[in-house]
Image: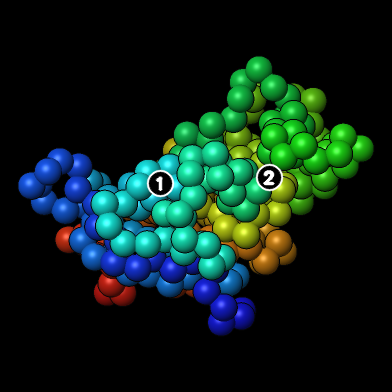
Amino acid sequence: MSTTAILRLEALSKRYRAGGEPLLDGLTLELQDGEFLAIMGESGTGKSTLLNIIAGLERADSGRVLFAGVDLGTLDDDALTRLRRARIGFVFQAFHVLPYLTVLQNVMLPLDLLAVPRAQREPRARLWLERCGIAALAAVYPRELSGGELQRIAIARALVHEPALLLADEPTGNLDAVTAAQILRLLREQLRASAASAILITHSLSAARSADRIVRLQAGTLGPDSQ
């Protein structure tokens, strides 16, 4: 792993109402290039809000998000959308797989949005289906698949455009323990293969232990996990 920071959060603060308690309070974090970080915390501590701020989906009240040296606060909404499409991948607990597209079409979607040349889209998508162990499902629709298979689709879709950063919000929350362990192992393998950095949001200590480092969000700030 290199020692170059792909992401720096500087003194982030966020309140949801004027005069209310801060959800994030001067939070600071540095994520190294190629690092897999897990963020733990109780419900309501602001984990998903933090992930949304990192992705540029929400704005902090104060502080800075530096992604690959770019201050996200200086970008307008269109520029943030372009950056997300090109350089960030997402994996969610609810999968967010589109039911009216086949498995192959779901995985090709980021390439479609980036206007990757047509001749390259299907071969790249099929390569990631193979890497994620679902090549045989290319023509199948999501309604026919298990939760573990849906999450494999989500991982392939998140990495097919070779993002610099992957954000995963409770990606194993809807899976049984055995399937969750398989998905986390697959995720780690594919992150290493693609040299992407990642942030995993989770309640599960066993899931967090798949990461290189664990921090805990508590009282609006991040600190080392003590478990």
Answer few, some or many: residues within 10 Å of disc 1's Cα (few below 14, many 20 plus, some between 14 and 19). Answer: some
Q: Amino acid at mark 2?
A: Ala
Residue 86 in the figure: left or right of residue 176: right
Q: Secondary structure at mark 1?
A: helix
User: Is residue 107 visible in the rendered structure shown here?
Assistant: no
Query: Who is closer to the viewer here, 180 or 47?
Result: 47
Picture coordinates of residue 56, whole percent (x, y): 45, 47
- Residue 156 — which label? 2
Picture coordinates of residue 67, whole percent (x, y): 51, 62
Q: Earlier in the sequence, mark 1 or mark 2?
A: 1
Vertical placement of 45 versus 117: above or below?
below
Residue 208 in the figure: left or right of residue 203: right
Picture coordinates of residue 111, whole percent (x, y): 74, 39
Q: Amino acid at mark 1?
A: Asn
Query: Who is closer to the viewer here, 188 or 71?
Result: 71
Residue 115 in the figure: left or right of residue 5: right
Q: Residue at x 10, y 46 (%)?
A: 20
Q: Secondary structure at mark 2?
A: helix
Quadrant of residue 63 within the rendered picture:
bottom left
Q: Residue furthest left?
A: 19
Q: Residue at x 76, y 47 (%)?
A: 128
- Residue 52 — which label? 1
Residue 174 in the figure: left or right of residue 12: right
Quadrant of residue 204 within the rendered picture:
bottom left
Q: Nearer the viewer, mark 1 or mark 2?
A: 1
Q: Residue at x 53, y 67 (%)?
A: 69
